[in-house]
């Protein structure tokens, strides 16, 4: 499994602790330094079954600074993917990628059912 996270994010720390308590093996990928590509994001979005807007970190400073709440509805999916790929801080985290699943954000009940 691959665990994309940001080391200073409290939700990521909580998810990481949850994984470790259950002995789940994973490879950590720092989302800020190793930001996802548009192709990766496209594949993850398809695998997750979630709408693309769920991949945006809507509580992040950059999201707010760019006023994306107002701009996203007018953007195409390709434009949104390209934008997400420009900065890992725009991407909602953590993301856990496993065999046949992609989990975005840490919802303990969902993770417990899936992992």
Image: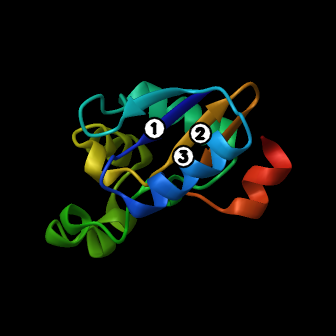
Q: Is residue 48 left or right of residue 66?
A: right
- Assign a secondary structure to mark 1: strand
Across and down, in percent, residue 22 comes to: 74, 42
The residue beneath circle 3 is 16
Q: Earlier in the sequence, mark 1 or mark 3?
A: 1
Q: Calculate the distance from the C-alpha at mark 2 to the C-alpha at mark 3.
A: 10 Å
Q: Calculate the distance from the C-alpha at mark 2 to the C-alpha at mark 1.
A: 6 Å
Local packing at callout 1 (Cα closer than 10 Å; few below 14, some 14-19, many 20+) is many
Across and down, in percent, residue 15 comes to: 57, 52
Across and down, in percent, residue 91 comes to: 37, 50
Which corner quadrant holds the C terminus? top right
Q: Nearer the viewer, residue 7 or 21?
A: 21
Between marks 2 and 3 in the image, the one whose residue lies nearer the viewer: 3
Whether residue 35 is situated above or below residue 71 in the rendered picture: above
The residue beneath circle 2 is 96
* Residue at (34% x, 64% y) in the render: 72
* Residue at (23% x, 43% y) in the render: 87
Whether residue 101 is situated above or below residue 107 in the rendered picture: above
């Amino acid at each position: 499994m691959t665990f994309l996270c940001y080391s200073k994010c409290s939700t990521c720390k909580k998810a990481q602790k949850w994984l470790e308590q259950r002995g789940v093996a994973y490879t950590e990928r720092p989302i800020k330094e190793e930001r996802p590509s548009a192709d990766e994001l496209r594949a993850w979005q398809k695998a997750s079954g979630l709408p693309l807007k769920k991949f945006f970190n809507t509580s992040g400073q950059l999201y707010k600074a760019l006023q994306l709440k107002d701009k996203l509805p007018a953007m195409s999916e390709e434009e949104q993917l390209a934008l997400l790929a420009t900065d890992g801080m725009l991407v909602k985290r953590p993301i856990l990628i496993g065999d046949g699943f992609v989990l975005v954000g840490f919802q303990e009940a969902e993770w417990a059912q899936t992992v």
